[in-house]
Structure formats: C-alpha cells, structure tokens
Image (cartoon, rainbow, N blue to C red):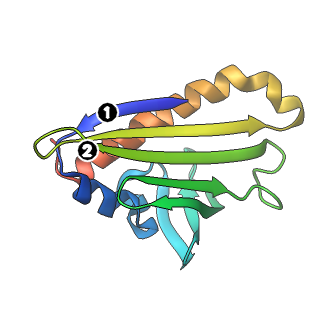
C-alpha cells in the first residue's frame, strides 16, 4: 500500500521530522510516546481506540539521508505475532519545488495464518493509517 502527498515544507524539514523516532508522536497515528531509542531501534507506545496501551518494537533497516528511511516492526514474541508475519514501512522524500516535498509512505504487511483472509480489512486500515500519517506530517511541519 502506497500513499503520496506534496507537503508545503522543505525536504530537510520533513527529513528532520520523519527520521527521528522521538518525533513519531507528533505525526504517526496512535503513538503516545517513543521509548528505548538506540541507534537503529525503538519502541512505539500506542494507544488503541479503546484506551489500551500496546508496545511495538521497530528496527531501522535502511537509511539514506535525506531521502529514504525504512523500518521493520519486530513481530516475533510480540502481541502482533499471531496476526503478522512481517510489517515494513518506507518513507521516501523528493524535492517538489520551492519549499515543497513529495512524501511517499508505503507499508508492506504480510498476514499470519488464518488472518490472511482479512487482507481487504488490513488494506483499508493501512490506507487510513498512511493518510493520517501524511496529515500528521503536514501539521507537524506547519501546513494548515
């Protein structure tokens, strides 16, 4: 699943936002805070719509400043292990003119076991999540 949007901010400003895990609560949906940040790994603390807190561990697997970053959710031995085999997020930035950046977010998710039959629901939820993340980026870099 891919979503693109042109944001009214310079690529460096967008890169500073999306490349720092500590900024995730400012723009990524449902992230309350980020903990245990080390060089290439961190933990997102998420709040579900029902108010429950869930922790999700991530590892950065690709880093091409200031244009591309890829992270993988560590699903083994996590609450997501029963549902997902793999979850990878890619953020790609491209200069789109005077103080504008084209942001492309993509999510690759492979469902586990019987959950594979719910792919249409996952695609819909992923599309919504990526759109909300793009909204968050626009708001965080000052787009009204």
Q: Which residue is mark 1?
A: 5
Residue 52 is at least partly visible in this image: no
Residue 42's spot in the image, x, y percent? 58, 70
Q: Which residue is mark 2?
A: 138
Q: Residue 93 — which label?
A: none
Question: Of the residues tagged 2 and 1, which is closer to the observer?
Answer: 1
Image-based side of 15 in relation to 47, left or right: left
Q: Quadrant of residue 26?
A: bottom left
Task: Pick the residue in front: 70 or 75.
Answer: 70
Extreme-left residue of the structure: 98
| Secondary element at image label 1 | strand
Extreme-front residue of the structure: 64
The relative height of residue 15 versus residue 126 in the rendered view (above or below) is below
Pointer 2 and pointer 1: residues touching (CB < 8 Å)?
yes
Please give the name of the residue rendered at 57% of the width and 24% of the height, measured from the top-left corner. 124
| Secondary element at image label 2 | helix
Q: Quadrant of the C terminus?
A: top left
Task: Pick the residue in front: 50 or 144.
Answer: 144
Task: Pick the residue in front: 55 or 37.
Answer: 37
Residue 75 is at least partly visible in this image: yes
Residue 23's spot in the image, x, y percent? 38, 64
The number of discs equals 2
Could you classify mark 1 by the number of other residues whose Cα lies within 10 Å: few (under 14), some (14-19), or many (20 or more)? some
Q: Quadrant of residue 36?
A: bottom right
Please give the name of the residue rendered at 63% of the width and 38% of the height, measured from the top-left corner. 108
Q: Of marks 2 and 1, which one's residue comes earlier in the chain? A: 1
The relative height of residue 96 versus residue 34 in the rendered view (above or below) is above
Q: Quadrant of the N terminus?
A: top right
The relative height of residue 88 versus residue 44 in the rendered view (above or below) is above
Residue 105's spot in the image, x, y percent? 45, 40
């Amino acid at each position: 699943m891919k979503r693109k949007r042109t944001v009214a901010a310079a690529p460096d400003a967008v890169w500073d936002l999306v490349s720092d895990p500590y900024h995730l609560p400012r723009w990524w949906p449902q992230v309350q805070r980020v903990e245990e940040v080390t060089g290439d790994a961190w933990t997102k603390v998420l709040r579900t719509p029902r108010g429950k807190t869930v922790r999700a561990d991530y590892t950065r697997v690709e880093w091409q400043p200031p244009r591309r970053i890829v992270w993988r959710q560590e699903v083994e031995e996590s609450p997501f292990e029963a549902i997902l085999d793999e979850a990878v997020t890619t953020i790609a930035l491209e200069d789109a003119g005077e103080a504008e950046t084209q942001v492309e977010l993509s999510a690759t998710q492979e469902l586990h076991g019987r959950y594979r039959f719910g792919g249409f629901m996952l695609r819909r939820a992923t599309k919504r999540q990526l759109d909300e993340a793009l909204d968050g980026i626009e708001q965080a870099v000052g787009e009204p």
